[in-house]
Structures are given as structure tokens and as C-alpha cells.
Image (cartoon, rainbow, N blue to C red):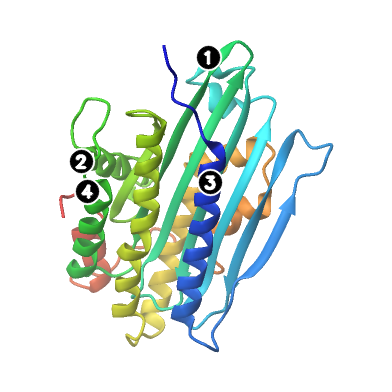
Amino acid sequence: MSVEPVDSTAVETYLRGLQQRICEALEAIEGEHGARFVRDAWQKPADSPLQGSGETRVMSDGRVFERAGVAFSDVRGSRLPPSATQNRPELAGRGFRAMGVSLVFHPRNPYVPTVHANVRFFVAEATHALPVWWFGGGFDLTPYYGFDDDVRHWHRTARRACDGFVDAAGEPAYPRLKRWCDDYFFLKHRDEPRGVGGLFFDDWNVGGFARSFALQRSVGDHFLNAYLPIVERRKGMSYGERERDWQLYRRGRYVEFNLVWDRGTSFGLQSGGRSESILMSMPPLAAWRYDYRPEAGTAEAELLEQYLVARDW
């Protein structure tokens, strides 16, 4: 029986190129005299249980983006952390390699949504056994104010990223990846979605390595097409203290999800990952208010009632 080879080098090359393209696009939005990404290349110490390297790029205090982070990491370990083997006991004791690009952008203007995206690859090796591998990733949007045009554009582009791909049952991939995103980016302790969704997939090895890698590339390549038109439409809108206060309040929900529910954060911290890179997703400012509920009929209430609900856009 022939086994399709796993080309980790090709994945690494793609991910590094994706990081570069996205950073260049954001710097172009900031303009000639706007903020630029600071590059922080890192290498795990030789005596660390986790080996590998990466580059975290962070933009701060920009005209458009209050903080933006785009991180590439490529790490290896001799043993997976408990969070990775709890539901996959066959991986216990295996060495692994995990690489990916993860980004979060926190815009300054409350009318521009926060956005998150991630594309990643995982492979676990063992002597006298075939490697276990999968791809994962997606992108999701967290607006502070709702605009139908923005959300529809976002979901149309997400659908195009999945065109031609099917899931393990042979069904079109998009409906499953959309539902997966709605289910994953949900604050169970608040009983509310984090945002308006998008795409999410994990443990994906449908149709062999080449086909699965093609899905990852398509998701990564569609991200800028999904997000940048929204930024261009909203970045010049005027706002005041009310909108800014609401933005900071809703950012608090973003922090809660990342620290309480996000599996990538848990995996990174439990496996000995680099804390600065893992936690770059945190906004520069956030706020919490006790049992706050926006006034009925306001744009803030509309966000909760019309947009932070799972629906087919």
C-alpha cells in the first residue's frame, strides 16, 4: 500500500510567506508614515523540553490598528501535553512537530471589527508506525457594531475559500466549517458567541496530504480578501467616547474566551510555548462592567440581538 508523503518543508515555506504577505498588507493600510511591525525572532533554549523557533511580529499604536500581531512558530517536542492526548490516547508518547501562523488585529476605530485567523499543521511521529498528521485553522470576525454588508461579504468570502472541498462524508466542506466556527468561538459561561463566525477546522486530513494542504492554503489566501474591504469601508468613520467604551467592554469578552476556552492557548502554555507569542492576541486595553446591558433600541443592543447569533448569512 502506497502512503502519500508528508511534506513539512512545503508547509513551512507557505506559512512563512503568508506571514510576510499579511504584514505587508497591514503596513500598506497604515500608510507611508504609519506604524510598522517589529520583528521578534526567537529560539527555544537547548535545555527546554520544547525545541524550535519562530518570529512574532507586532504592530502597536498605529493609525488604524491599535495592536496587530502575526506570529509564525515551528516547534518540536518529545512528548505531547495532556491537553493534546486526552481525546487521542494513540498519540501518547509520540514526538511531534507543530507549526502555524496565528494573528489577531485590534483596530483603533470601534467600527472596524477585531479579527483572528490561524492556519496550522501538526504531525506526530513514532518508530515503526505511520505518522499521524492533520491541518487546522480558519478565520473569525468580532465586530463591535453590526453592518450587514460587512458580515455578508465576510461569509461569502469564507464560502469561496471552501469551494471544491468536501468533508470526510463527501459533503461540501463550507457548511461544516461554518458550524464548527459557530460552535467553537462561543463563550459557554456567557451563553453568547464571541463574534459573527467564519471558518474553523481541526484534525483535518480529508483526501490525503496534498488535498488537505490545499484547503489550508485556500483559507489562508482568502483571509485578506475577506477582511481588508471591511477595514477600508469603516476605518474613516467618526466615533466618540460612547463607541470607544463599548469597544473596550466587548474586548473583555475576547480576553475571556482566549484565556478560558481557546485550545490553542492551552496547548501552547502546557507544552512550554513562548508566553509572549501565545498571549500577543490580548488587546492593549479592555474593560469589564458588572452586569451591563445596553439600552434597548441602540446600536449596541442591535449587535447582541441581530449579529451575535448563529445564522446563515
Q: Are marks 1 and 4 in contact (CB under 8 Å)?
A: no
Q: 301 above or below 258?
A: below
Report the mark closest to the observer, 1 or 4.
1
Spatial CA distance of label 2 from label 4 is 12 Å
Spatial CA distance of label 1 from label 3 is 23 Å
Q: Earlier in the sequence, mark 1 or mark 2?
A: 1
Spatial CA distance of label 1 from label 4 is 34 Å
What residue sits right under mark 1 in the picture? 90
Q: 166 above or below 23?
A: above
Amino acid tagged 3: Gly
Q: Which mark, residue 175?
A: 2
Q: Quadrant of residue 228 in the image?
A: bottom left
Amino acid tagged 4: Ala
- Picture coordinates of residue 171, whole percent (x, y): 18, 32
Give the left or right position of residue 17, taking residue 181 as reference.
right
Label 3 element class: strand
